Structure formats: structure tokens, C-alpha cells
């Protein structure tokens, strides 16, 4: 098995930092540049360059999360083999679900249907595209469940794996706390979306960005501290 070095931890931290940057860009885009959809017609905004840039940034940085998932799995392969392996498996599954969802959303809905909708000459043509779009949104409700569940299970597994470092105290607590909070956040989203727990709807709306931002900043700090320690140990 390969030995982890400072560059591996730096790469993991940078990939999560890129994910944070994309999430921040998305938050700003939705607040200031992308109009809020009130009808299906309003939601067909994929022709906007800012929305295309947002979609590509989110999709690309989600793929990058494979790097920190792999680094964590390798770090704890000896001390927590089952938890680290399950974390990597479910983490890769989450990235796969997200990538398929977002690539379909961008290339099919955004690049094909939105153009067809904009160029449609008659009402019936537009209505047919909107019906297709409504069916897509209905299908996504089912797709989101394994997507959320896989990330929930990955977060639980990584929380268990990284807990093996807490005996060192200090910033080593950041990763297990971050992944535990992420598991709770995702559990809340599952309960909100699929169990009718309405008071948790904020996890999908107003609280989404603050919680994702906070959790991932904690992980970036943890990775960079690991890189610093690796440098000091090798000095």
C-alpha cells in the first residue's frame, strides 16, 4: 500500500477548498444573478451563462471529492480497515450518483431541452418540453434518496475512522466532528424529504450553505494540519 505524504494531505485539502469555492459561487449566483423560478417556464434558466458556469463548477468539484475520500481511507486502512473501506465505497458511490445526476441535468436538460424550449415556435411544443421537465423532476425525487443515503453512510464511516486520532486531542477532533455533523445534516435532509419531518426543511433551504461551508472548512483545516505535521515529522 502507498505511504501518505504531505502532498497527499495538501491535495485532499485543496480539493475540498475547491468544493467550498464552488458552493460559495453557487450561493452568490442564486442570490444575485440567477432568477428564482416561480413556474416551470421560469426554471428553464439553463441558457444563462452564469448558470452553466455554476453547474459545471459544482459537478467538477464534486468529482474532486474522490481525492480526500481516498486519502482518508489510506490513512486509516490499518487502524480502522472496515470503516475506512466502507467510507471510500459509499463516498465513491455518492460521487457517482451526483455526477450522473448533474451531467444529465446539464447536458440533457440544460443543453438540449432548454435550447428546444427557447426555439419552440408553438405552445404545444413548449408544453411537451415542460411535461418532460416535470417528469425529470419527479424522477429526481427517487434518485436523491440513494444519493443522500450514500453520503450519509460515508460520513458515518469516516467519522468512526477518524475518531482513532482523537486521543491526540487538539485539532484532530475536527474531522470526526465534521463528519458527524455532516451525517446529522444528511439524516435531517432524508427525514425532511422522505419522512415528512417538515421542521427540518431548513436543511434543504436556508441552512444548506452555512452548514456545508462550516463542515468543509473544518475538514480543510484538518487536512492542512495533517500536512504540516507530516512536514514537521519529516524534518
Image (cartoon, helix red, strand yellow):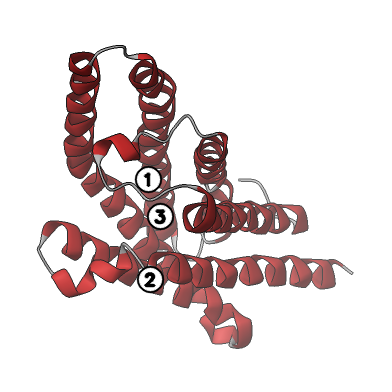
Q: Is residue 127 above or below residue 205?
A: above
Q: Position of residue 136 (x, y in %)?
A: 22, 31
Number of numbered discs visible in the structure rendering = 3
Q: Nearer the viewer, residue 227 or 126?
A: 126
Horizontal and vertical percent position of residue 6 = 76, 59
Tell me residue 166's x, y (percent): 52, 82
Which residue is drawn at the image coordinates 25% and 13% (left, top)? 122
**Does the image show residue 113?**
yes
Side of 65 where 234 appears, left or right: right
Q: Residues within 10 Å of mark 2 (few under 14, many from 20)?
A: few
Return the x and y of residue 164 as percentages of the image width and height. 49, 75
Give the residue drawn at x 32%, y 14%: 120
Residue 134 shown left or right of residue 108 in the figure: left
For the N terminus, the image quarter is: top right
- Marks 2/3: CA distance? 25 Å
Q: Is residue 26 left or right of residue 224?
A: left
At mark 3, the secondary structure is: helix
Ranked by sequence position, the earlier of labels 1 and 2 is 1
At a point 44% along the width and 32% down the height, the residue shown is 46
Is residue 117 depicted above or below 41 in this figure? above
Query: Where is mark 2, residue-wise?
Result: 207
Q: Residue at the far front: name it.
A: 122
Q: Secondary structure at mark 1?
A: helix
Q: Badge 1 local density, few (<14 within 10 Å), some, or many (20+)?
A: many
Q: Give the crowd class for mark 3: few <14, some 14-19, many >=20 residues within 10 Å.
A: many
Question: Which mark sits nearer the N-terminus, 3 or 1?
Answer: 3
Q: Which residue is mark 1?
A: 94
Amino acid at each position: 500500500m502507498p505511504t501518505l505524504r504531505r502532498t497527499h494531505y495538501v491535495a485532499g485539502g485543496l480539493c475540498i477548498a475547491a468544493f467550498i469555492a464552488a458552493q460559495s459561487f453557487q450561493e452568490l449566483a442564486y442570490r444575485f444573478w440567477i432568477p428564482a423560478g416561480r413556474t416551470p417556464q421560469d426554471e428553464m434558466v439553463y441558457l444563462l451563462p452564469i448558470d452553466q458556469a455554476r453547474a459545471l463548477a459544482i459537478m467538477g468539484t464534486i468529482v474532486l471529492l474522490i481525492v480526500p475520500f481516498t486519502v482518508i481511507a489510506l490513512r486509516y486502512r490499518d487502524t480502522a480497515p472496515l470503516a475506512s473501506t466502507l467510507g471510500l465505497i459509499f463516498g465513491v458511490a455518492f460521487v457517482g450518483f451526483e455526477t450522473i445526476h448533474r451531467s444529465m441535468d446539464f447536458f440533457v436538460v440544460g443543453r438540449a431541452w432548454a435550447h428546444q424550449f427557447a426555439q419552440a415556435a408553438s405552445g404545444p411544443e413548449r408544453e411537451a418540453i415542460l411535461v418532460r421537465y416535470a417528469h425529470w423532476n419527479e424522477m429526481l425525487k427517487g434518485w436523491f434518496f440513494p444519493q443522500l443515503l450514500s453520503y450519509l453512510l460515508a460520513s458515518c464511516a469516516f467519522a468512526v475512522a477518524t475518531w482513532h486520532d482523537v486521543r491526540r486531542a487538539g485539532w484532530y477532533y475536527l474531522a470526526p466532528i465534521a463528519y458527524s455533523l455532516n451525517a446529522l445534516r444528511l439524516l435531517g435532509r432524508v427525514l425532511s424529504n422522505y419522512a415528512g419531518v417538515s421542521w427540518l426543511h431548513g436543511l434543504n433551504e436556508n441552512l444548506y450553505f452555512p452548514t456545508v461551508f462550516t463542515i468543509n472548512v473544518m475538514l480543510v483545516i484538518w487536512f492542512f494540519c495533517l500536512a504540516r505535521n507530516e512536514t514537521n515529522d519529516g524534518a
